[in-house]
């Protein structure tokens, strides 16, 4: 069963009232106790021995034989009823208690009203914040919470909220663009297939040869669709995979180069790996292999006839550096800033070379980020590009670390 919680206002008012009650009660108990001690112990008591009523003015004369002389005047409450000093003290203390309790009740009542008003006033900015937040939804992320109030915690909360909204707005707009780009990419092969199917269907004199050609086109478009869907899946799921395999990057790269050899031959580009001893990292081999392939394939496809692609490894204390350098068409600085965005293609290179979806580098960046690595690019138009990958070096197991520490001594 869900636990019922008090509203913040009730909670605040409750604690304020409790504080008023405790303070008031404490004060009253203290006053009463002190008064009682003072009157009973400190002020000397008077023993009234004789009360001699005066018949004329209702005043009586008091004679205290204990302390000798003392004469005073007492006013009798009712004729014939005298009060000893102690009785008068007890009566005064009783009145004090009654007045204290009545005062406490009044303080409590006023305190409760005050506490309720105060908590309402204190929570007013939170309520207006909550009203604004309720107005904001996915289609209305441009709205912001006003931050023109005093410099207090509420303003800080509103500012943090506005920052979160800006990030959310940016994120959602990126997502929308991604979906529309993806839909556009999926639509193109479908349209090509539709045109082919319709032309084959509409023409009753279609020859066997034309059918074969048409099916060939459809098959290529299906391949393209499959690749695109694989890429989209890779973009949506790379963060959730276990990254514990021990990978020999040198061996992995040799396999990638062998697989890309036919493409390199087609583009008349030479692939070259600089000599290196075994280089290890931890991660998911299938993903890292895909990331490396994307970059090397780009380096081949966006190269010139007779060009080269050189791959080099360098081990630093904490990182492994992998450089993939090509002698291709290169990119301008303003283009470099966007190449890791999904669906970004440079039309110039695309028209001359190859019609990819523009997802390769975005997927690569995601995979490397998931492995705790980075990727950067430098390029000169007409001269070539250089992509640098960093991956963290695997940490040695604790036991071997201890052994190494000992052997240093
Ligand atoms: N080595 C390179 N030299 C020149 N331009 C490059 C290079 N690598 C990438 N580019 C440019 O960056 C763009 C984005 O590359 P990316 O790999 O993301 O997409 P793509 O190759 O067009 O398609 P795919 O999704 O099939 O990889 C490419 O279209 C290309 O214009
Ligand atoms: Mg590519």
Image (cartoon, rainbow, N blue to C red):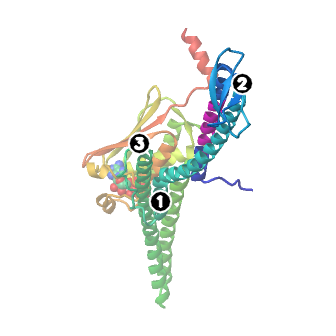
Which numbered mark, 1 or 2, is in the foreground of this view?
2
Q: Is residue 225 above or below residue 257?
A: below
Residue on which disc 1 sits: 133
Q: Is residue 132 visible?
A: yes
N-term-proximal mark, 1 vs 3: 1
Query: Which class describes the residues within 10 Å of circle 3: few (<14), some (14-19), or many (20+)?
Result: some
Looking at this view, name the residue that lies furthest to the bottom: 204
- Helix or strand or loop: what does disc 2 sit on? loop
Spatial CA span between label 3 and label 2: 104 Å
CA separation, marks 1 and 3? 38 Å
Which residue in the protein does label 2 denote? 48
Instruction: Report x, y in % for residue 210.
Output: 46, 80
Secondary structure at badge 3 equals strand
How crowded pointer 2 is (Cα within 10 Å; few <14, some 14-19, many 20+) is rated as: some
Image position, residue 120 (x, y; %):
51, 54
Whole-number angstrom distance, CA of label 1 to CA of label 2:
78 Å
In the rendered image, residue 332, in percent from the top left (x then y), is placed at 26, 50
Q: Is 20 inside the magenta-drawn segment?
A: yes
- Kindly tell me whether residue 268 is visible in this rendering: no
Closer to viewer: mark 3 or mark 2: 2
Query: Mark 3 = which residue?
Result: 375
- Residue 202 vertical placement versus 247 (above, below): below
Nearer to me, 51 or 22: 51
Describe residue 108's horizontal placement relative to residue 330 as left or right: right
Could you tell me what secondary structure mostly forms the magenta stretch?
A: helix
Q: Residues within 10 Å of mark 1 (few under 14, many from 20)?
A: some
Q: Is mark 3 within 8 Å of ligand 1?
A: no
Residue at 47% x, 86% y is: 206
Q: Residue 371's x, y, as percent? A: 52, 41
Provide the residue span drawn in magenta.
17-32
């Amino acid at each position: 069963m869900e636990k019922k919680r008090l509203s913040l206002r009730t909670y605040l008012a409750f604690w304020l009232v409790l504080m008023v009650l405790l303070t008031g009660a404490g004060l009253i108990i203290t006053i009463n106790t002190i008064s009682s001690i003072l009157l009973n112990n400190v002020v000397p008591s008077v023993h009234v021995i004789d009360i001699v009523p005066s018949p004329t003015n209702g005043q009586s004369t008091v004679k205290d034989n204990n302390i000798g002389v003392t004469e005073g005047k007492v006013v009798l409450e009712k004729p014939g009823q005298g009060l000893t000093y102690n009785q008068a003290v007890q009566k005064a203390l009783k009145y004090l208690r009654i007045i204290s309790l009545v005062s406490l009740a009044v303080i409590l009542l006023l305190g409760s009203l005050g506490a309720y008003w105060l908590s309402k006033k204190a929570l007013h900015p939170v309520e207006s914040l909550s009203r604004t937040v309720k107005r904001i939804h996915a289609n209305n992320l441009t709205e912001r919470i006003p931050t023109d109030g005093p410099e207090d915690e509420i303003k800080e909360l509103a500012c943090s909220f506005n920052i979160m909204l800006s990030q959310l707005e940016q994120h959602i707009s990126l997502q929308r663009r991604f979906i529309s780009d993806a839909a556009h990419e999926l639509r193109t092969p479908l349209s090509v297939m539709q045109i082919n199917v319709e032309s084959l269907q509409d023409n009753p004199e279609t020859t066997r040869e034309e059918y074969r050609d048409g099916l060939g086109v459809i098959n290529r478009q299906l391949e393209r669709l499959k690749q695109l869907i694989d890429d989209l899946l890779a973009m949506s799921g790379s963060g959730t995979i276990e990254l514990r395999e021990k990978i020999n990057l040198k061996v992995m790269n040799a396999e990638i180069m062998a697989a890309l050899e036919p493409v390199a031959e087609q583009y008349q580009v030479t692939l070259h790996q600089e000599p290196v001893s075994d280089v290890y990292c931890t991660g998911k081999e299938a993903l890292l292999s895909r990331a490396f392939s994307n970059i090397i394939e780009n380096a081949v496809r966006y190269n010139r006839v007779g060009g080269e692609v050189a791959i080099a490894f360098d081990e630093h204390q904490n990182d492994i550096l992998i450089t993939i350098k090509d002698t291709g068409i290169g990119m301008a600085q303003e283009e470099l800033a966007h190449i890791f965005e999904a669906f970004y293609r440079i039309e110039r290179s695309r028209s001359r070379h190859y019609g990819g979806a523009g997802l390769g580098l975005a997927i690569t960046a995601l995979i490397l980020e998931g492995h705790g690595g980075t990727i950067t690019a430098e390029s000169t138009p007409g001269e070539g590009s250089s992509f640098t990958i960093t991956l963290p070096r695997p940490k040695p197991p604790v036991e071997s670390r201890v052994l190494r520490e000992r052997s240093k001594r």
